[in-house]
Image: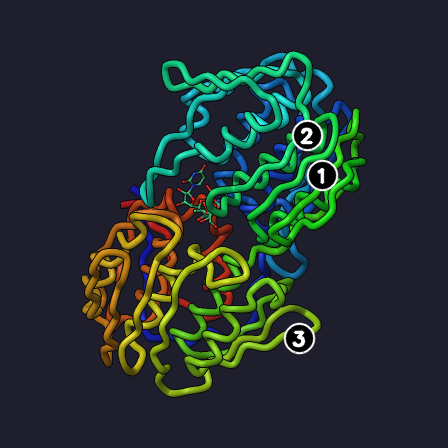
């Protein structure tokens, strides 16, 4: 098994190149199924989830050529350019064994039903952080006239005469549901109005691509989006936005370990709530022309409460990392996870470092301690793996972290990026 070994106690100084956003690249790639012309997507991150989606799209018959780039003066990946062409799609079936490996691949149902009038896609099922139902996604497609049946774990979607624009009110905010409805409604006949839509920057990235492909979309990034369907979408090109979750993660790592780091390419406008919270903790976090400059100002950080919400609130994907940060802050931090029902699995692992954390229902109370000690821990899910690495960066002694497949889904070249800033972190085979 591969493990990470970290020697704690070293400050982070230098710069980290922030990769393209996983949660933007995935829907951008899926949008290639909407047209028979070539899409070019730049700044695609080098992640296992992306490689998995390439395999899933190829299974549908999408031609994909990947050109990798490296950043100058270092061996850090500067992401890839993906050339995707769906003029020879010969399979409208997404099998369980592929969808199960990367849940967001379920979103292919939207372009398949919108462009081809038929899709058979395995239900994605739950994951470590929750049951992850797709009921709102299916209700939205029904609102556009799709006939939806569920048989033996598969969703059979049909719209022989194409989709028809309609109004749809999301019962709860859903990022995937908003992506799905944007893609499906772009090729529907007539107008679709979405209410209570997700506002994440990744939604805007997808909408901007669809508009460049000829779609007629207004309001992306706000809760109300109007899509006037068009007959056909053409090829285009777009760059994946920088990964705000990766940037927020490294900002918290610097805040925890101490030091000063430039997060090259990061956009502070995509982290409004995180910027305020970290400043309140005693962290210097400021926009600079090259990205975001982060510096730990106070000797010890102050505890601050957070409650996770949809964008522009505090992101659920940074909750575990913030919890790690609070383990050595002064005072008590109350952390409320409102998006997923089981996103505290990092708590038991963080307690192995000597952290003082009490969980009752959806609330965790972190009481800061002076020091953490090294531990041997196992990652439980993607973002939790980063919280354990942060603890290892400050813990006294040598920490080991296993189950790295979780980490490799969402953080490109994490060790190399931290090593370049002075961390003693290595990946070993045990
Ligand atoms: C996206 O997941 C992200 N994944 C998640 O990031 C992120 O945590 C989440 O949005 C929230 O921001 C990608 O973009 C690939 P939702 P998604 O639909 O779209 C419930 C990471 O670490 N819900 O916004 O699946 C759902 O169970 C991942 O990169 C329904 O009940 O999330 C959850 O409790 C983790 N019915 C809440 O809504 C539905 O039909 C928000 O889910 C859909 C969702």
Vertical side of 322 occupied by 75: above or below: above
Q: Are marks 2 and 1 in contact (CB under 8 Å)?
A: yes
Mark 2 or mark 3: which comes first in sequence?
Answer: 2
Q: Judge from the rendering whether residue 238 lies leftward or rightward of residue 133; answer left or right.
A: right
Identify the element where label 2 is drawn: loop
Vertical side of 337 occupied by 408: above or below: above
Q: Nearer the viewer, mark 2 or mark 3?
A: 2
Vertical side of 88 occupied by 98: above or below: below
Rounded to the nearest angstrom, the CA distance separating label 2 from label 3 is 43 Å
Q: Are marks 3 and 1 in contact (CB under 8 Å)?
A: no
Identify the element where label 3 is drawn: strand
Residue 227's disc number: 1
Tag 1: Cα neighbours inside 10 Å, few (<14), some, or many (≥20)?
Answer: many
Q: Position of residue 152 (x, y in %)?
A: 36, 14
The residue shown at (80%, 30%) is 234
Q: Nearer the viewer, residue 1 or 102?
A: 102
Q: Judge from the rendering whether residue 191 lies leftward or rightward of residue 77; answer left or right.
A: right
Mark 2 or mark 1: which comes first in sequence?
Answer: 2
Q: Position of residue 333 (x, y in %)?
A: 30, 73
Q: Quadrant of residue 11 in the image? A: bottom left
Q: Position of residue 382 (x, y in %)?
A: 39, 48
Q: Which residue is mark 3?
A: 288
Identify the element where label 1 is drawn: strand
Q: Position of residue 387 (x, y in %)?
A: 35, 60
Does residue 415 appear anywhere in the picture? no
The residue shown at (49%, 58%) is 416
Q: Nearer the viewer, residue 1 or 89?
A: 89
Vertical side of 85 occupied by 428: above or below: below
Q: Which residue is mark 2?
A: 165
Q: Judge from the rendering whether residue 383 lies leftward or rightward of residue 356; answer left or right.
A: right
């Amino acid at each position: 098994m591969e493990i990470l070994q970290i020697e704690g106690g070293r400050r982070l100084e230098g710069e980290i190149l922030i990769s393209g956003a996983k949660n933007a690249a995935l829907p951008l790639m899926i949008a290639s199924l909407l047209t028979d012309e070539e899409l070019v997507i730049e700044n695609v991150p080098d992640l296992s989830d992306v490689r998995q989606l390439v395999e899933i799209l190829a299974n549908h018959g999408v031609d994909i050529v990947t050109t990798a780039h490296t950043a100058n003066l270092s061996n850090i990946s500067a992401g890839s350019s993906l050339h995707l062409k769906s003029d020879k799609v010969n399979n409208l079936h997404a099998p369980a064994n592929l969808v199960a490996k990367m849940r967001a691949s379920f979103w292919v149902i939207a372009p398949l039903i919108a462009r081809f009038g038929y899709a058979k896609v395995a239900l994605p099922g739950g994951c470590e952080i929750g049951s992850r139902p797709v009921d709102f996604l299916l209700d939205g497609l029904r609102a556009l006239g799709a006939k939806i049946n569920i048989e033996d774990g598969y969703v059979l979607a049909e719209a022989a005469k194409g989709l028809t624009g309609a109004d749809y009110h999301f019962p709860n905010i859903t990022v995937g549901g908003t992506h799905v409805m944007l893609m499906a409604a772009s090729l529907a006949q007539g107008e679709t109005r979405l209410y209570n839509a997700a506002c994440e920057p990744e939604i805007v990235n997808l909408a901007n691509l669809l508009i460049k492909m000829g779609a007629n979309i207004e309001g992306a990034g706000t809760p109300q989006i109007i899509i006037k369907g068009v007959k056909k979408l053409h090829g285009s090109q777009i760059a994946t936005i920088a990964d705000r979750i990766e940037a927020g993660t490294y900002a918290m790592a610097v805040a925890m370990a101490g030091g000063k780091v430039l997060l090259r390419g990061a956009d502070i406008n995509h982290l409004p709530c995180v910027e305020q919270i970290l400043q309140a903790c005693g962290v210097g976090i400021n926009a600079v022309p090259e990205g975001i400059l982060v510096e730990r100002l106070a000797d010890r950080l102050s505890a601050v409460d957070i409650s996770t919400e949809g964008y522009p609130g505090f992101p659920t994907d940074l909750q575990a990392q913030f919890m790690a940060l609070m383990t050595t802050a002064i005072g008590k931090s109350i952390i409320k996870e409102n998006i997923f029902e089981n996103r505290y699995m990092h708590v038991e692992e963080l307690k192995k470092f000597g952290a003082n954390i009490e969980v009752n229902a959806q609330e965790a109370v972190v009481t800061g301690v002076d020091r953490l000690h090294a531990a041997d821990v196992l990652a439980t899910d993607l973002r939790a793996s980063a919280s354990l690495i942060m603890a290892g960066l400050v813990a006294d002694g040598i920490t080991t972290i296993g189950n790295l497949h979780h980490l490799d889904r969402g953080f490109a070249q994490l060790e190399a990026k931290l090593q370049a800033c002075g961390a003693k972190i290595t990946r070993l085979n045990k």
